[in-house]
Amino acid sequence: MFTVSFIAAMMMLFNHGGNSDKPQKDDNVRKNIELTDEQKAISRASNEFTFDFMKILASKEGKNVNMFASPFSLQTALAMTTEGAVGDTREEMLKALKLSDFSQEEIAGFYKTIIPALEKVDKKTVMEIANSFWSKKAIEIKKDYAAILKADYYAECETLANDKKEAAEAVNAWCSKKTHGMINHVVDEVSEEQMVALINAIYFNGEWSEPFRERSNYDTDFTNHDGTTSKVTLMRREDDMDVYLGEEARSLSLPYGNRAYVMTIILPEKGVDVDDVVAKLDADTWRKYRYGGRNYEVTLSFPKFETEYTTSDLCIKTLKDMGLKKAFTRSADFTGISKTTLFISQIIHKARVKVNEKGTEAAAVSYIGMELTSAIPRQEHITFKVDRPFIYAISEVSTGAIVFMGVQKKF
């Protein structure tokens, strides 16, 4: 009798304590990032920089080369540099970065707000943004400049060793740590002439809101940009999705975590060159690809893939074509950084992405080296088979900020 009563009492206590009938509270509901009107405008300008950079870079890159980059990372590193630019150098840089309509205070305020906001908007998605400023002991950095980088860009200030290899090892170790080992090597050595380095690192790791099932995978031919074919594994999923059907390309977006981040896939129609679609990317076309979809029953087939991309000389040539020229010459004025005159002598941008059934892991590093100068009704069924070159981007939903963008031309 005692045993039966005891068990019954324990069961009642367990059921009451567990609140099994009450729905569990989701503490990771997506919330919009709140920006001022000026910050929203800067976010839009950042996307414009992304479109222009990718268009010009693609026009200079090889026809059968996979590209993956974070222009957002590059713009952030260059924005830190503009904090020390003066006169014509500053004006030219801001124009190239699409930021000439904003004061330096507004730009710094944007990064002070957006960096922690992007990191916290989804607890299930890892987004980490790190900045650092490196200088050799031989050069005196202005205290005001260092203070702005620390306060508004959350930058770590580090000493750059005089030894070429030792300096490179420290920089590479920092980049590896901030990208969780995805990008272990950025520079071979730091030259004796290089006095200052500014680095931005971004790491993203997100699981699809609705993962693919590995048992649905199948192998097929992917038609590369040069007309050859390669065997790829396509992940397959059937679901209701919003698809945009344009004359030249179709698109859909796959959400991560709490849907704060999405990957937008832009697939050119057969016979349309992916480079032509990239060349026409701007705010208006992006708005259609990202938000212009209608609801369909979709059979999506999307490749598992990994891509790593590095650009240096082409990156500088691209920025020069965008109007950033004086900063690379010995007539540059960065006296806001130091009394010692400096110019940008090196830019390295490196990015890597892995896409599989669970989600996406991506990272990017931007290195800037400076030397002394001395609900819609469902329609028909859609097949969305990504078996040819395509464009993809990862963006935050509420701000629209594009963090990564890539063009996959071959396997």
Image: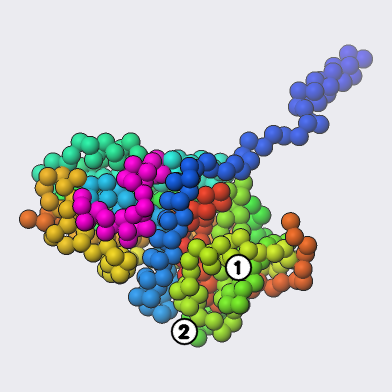
In the drawing, does residue 9 fall left or right of residue 409? right
Q: Quadrant of residue 240?
A: bottom right
The colour scheme of the drawn protein is rainbow
> Looking at the picture, does residue 120 appear above or below residue 364?
above
Residue on which disc 2 sits:
226
The disc, 2 or 1, on the residue closer to the chain's N-terminal end is: 2
Q: Is residue 349 visible?
A: yes
Callout 2 crowding tier (Cα within 10 Å): few <14, some 14–19, many ≥20: few
Q: Amino acid at mark 2?
A: Asp
Say which residue appears at 24% left-offset and 39% top-offset. Answer: 146
Q: Amino acid at mark 1?
A: Ser
Rendered image: mark on residue 333: none
Location of residue 4 in the rendering, given as x and y in whole percent from the top left corner: 89, 19
Query: For this rendering, which residue is in front, 239 or 189?
Result: 239
> Looking at the picture, does residue 68 appear above or below residue 164?
below
Say which residue appears at 72% left-offset and 34% top-offset. Answer: 24
Examine the structure image and report whether residue 48 is included in the region drawn in magenta: no
Location of residue 362 in the rendering, given as x and y in whole percent from the top left corner: 46, 56
> Looking at the picture, does residue 301 appear above or below residue 19?
below
Q: Is residue 315 visible?
A: no
Provide the residue span drawn in magenta: 86-112
Say which residue appears at 81% left-offset and 26% top-offset. Answer: 15
Badge 1 marks a residue whose secondary structure is strand
Badge 2 marks a residue whose secondary structure is loop
Rendered image: mark on residue 251: 1
Extreme residue in the right direction:
1
In the drawing, does residue 397 fall left or right of residue 337? right
